[in-house]
Amino acid sequence: MTERAASKPRFDAVTIGASAGGVEALSELLPRLPADLRASIVVVLHLPRERPSMLAEVFARRCALAVREAHDKDALRPGTVYFAPPDYHVLFDRGPQIALSTEALVQYSRPSIDVAFESAAELFRERLLAMVLTGANEDGAKGLRTVQECGGTTIVQSPQTAKSSLMPASALRSVRADHVLPLEDIATLMLAFHREGRL
Amino acid sequence: MDAEEVSEADISPLDTFDIELRLLVDAVYLRYHYDFRRYAMASLKRRMTAAMSQFDCRTLSQLQDKVLHEPTVFSALLNYLTVQVSEMFRDPGYFLALRTSVLPLLRTYPSLKIWVAGCSTGEEAYSLAILLHEEGLLSRSLIYATDINPHALKKAEAGVYEIDRIAEFTDNHRKSGSTHSLSEYYTAAYDHAVFDAALKKHLVFSDHSLATDTVFAEVQFVSCRNVLIYFDRELQDRAVGLFRDALCRKGFLGIGAKESLGLSAHSEAFDKVAREHRIFQKKA
């Protein structure tokens, strides 16, 4: 087990995409993660574009991890969760650091999960863990495929356990995901990665 | 981060696409004197990927070949190198904060000069003209709106926007604290809204590069929102340095809601006025 784990990459970043039902899903997942996680977590959750998001404040109170809203040029810190701000795409530049963009909506969304995943995939390659959770549109399916093509590890919430199954089902049509699991088991898997020193 | 935590992404070699991208922006600079060399790479990569498919190129090297030998291709590529997405009264809270915290002070000047840097297709410049009109300041104001993209400037000068965008503009305008209707400022013609000549009289659109040009006037207020996000830190510093030099003592600077001056070499030169809306005032 140790030997196998050693041959597997350590993750520098985790990207999580979710839409309808996402807040509840993240509430089951993020509070279970320990403060000494080595990777940074970036969450792209579809939100109304015209008003400020309270997600960072809400989750900061519930999580052992540090939680903040992603701002342009923020350096990605270990053990920190970054929420994509409403009405901006989140991308990643060498550093690694956050790069925001106000370019056109993708999949009717800004932030778009596809945009964030594709950018993260190209920067972090096999050191990226990306997951698509509950949601009622097809954003994330294309991005998750790019993650896999670049050598990253992919997780999809099992559609039958998702509040909204369309987004995870679309992701599964797009990629043969490495793991298809209910939320509870995704948290358990992440804790196992953490124990192996990979996360 | 300690040494152990240095990410692979820091030290990994450039992949072929990154190399081609650097060569492309060098070529553009040498041939056309447009300087994208200090742009943030992440979104530029995305836009160049879209350009490759638009110009039917399999690689960025092929695109570079076309760009060097066909000036019309470069002209069209400018719409990919720059970002033209904009809307009127984007982040209405910013305009509300201008009404309450900035205009009362700007009102004390006998004449006003305002610089909208990176104005793209003009939405922000028209929004400010409307705001000044509603606050009774437009008649003594001049708004310089600058950009590097000639296609965008041409559209800005025309002040004509697709009618299906007006609903969003109207909603934003209402939330900006206005007691007027946006329809007072435009005439609908078929599927377009044409903004009034009375606003345009106070708008000067011109070509200016934050990467290569210098300060052209003294102004009391600079609005530059969601432009700095497309620059790397070095170019951000250059741009903010220009704003600092252009602003009069106690002049104001507004930047995008998720942008910051915190790490800029010039952050010490400014005080925060409206923190949440990223409005700063140059120190006396």
Image (cartoon, coloured by chain):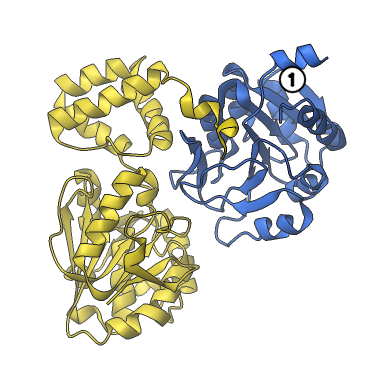
Chain colours: A blue, B yellow
Q: Is residue B99 left or right of residue A137?
A: left
Whether residue B184 is situated above or below residue B161 in the rendered picture: below
Foreground: A44 or A142? Answer: A44
Residue B115 picture location, percent across and down: 23, 64
Mark 1 falls within which chain?
A
* x 50%, y 49%: residue: A88
* x 13%, y 28%: residue: B31
Q: Secondary structure at mark 1?
A: loop
Q: Is residue B133 left or right of residue B94?
A: left
Whether residue B209 is situated above or below residue B219 in the rendered picture: above
Let me know if residue B43 appears in the view: yes
* x 61%, y 56%: residue: A48
Q: Residues within 10 Å of mark 1 (few under 14, many from 20)?
A: few
Residue B71 picture location, percent across and down: 15, 27
Whether residue B21 is situated above or below residue B57 in the rendered picture: below
The image quarter in which residue B36 lies:
top left
Counting the numbered discs, the total is 1
* x 44%, y 75%: residue: B96
Residue kind at label 1, given as amino acid type? Asp
Q: Quadrant of the N terminus of chain B?
A: top right
Q: Quadrant of the C terminus of chain B?
A: bottom left
Residue that carries the numbered disc 1 in the rendered image = A178
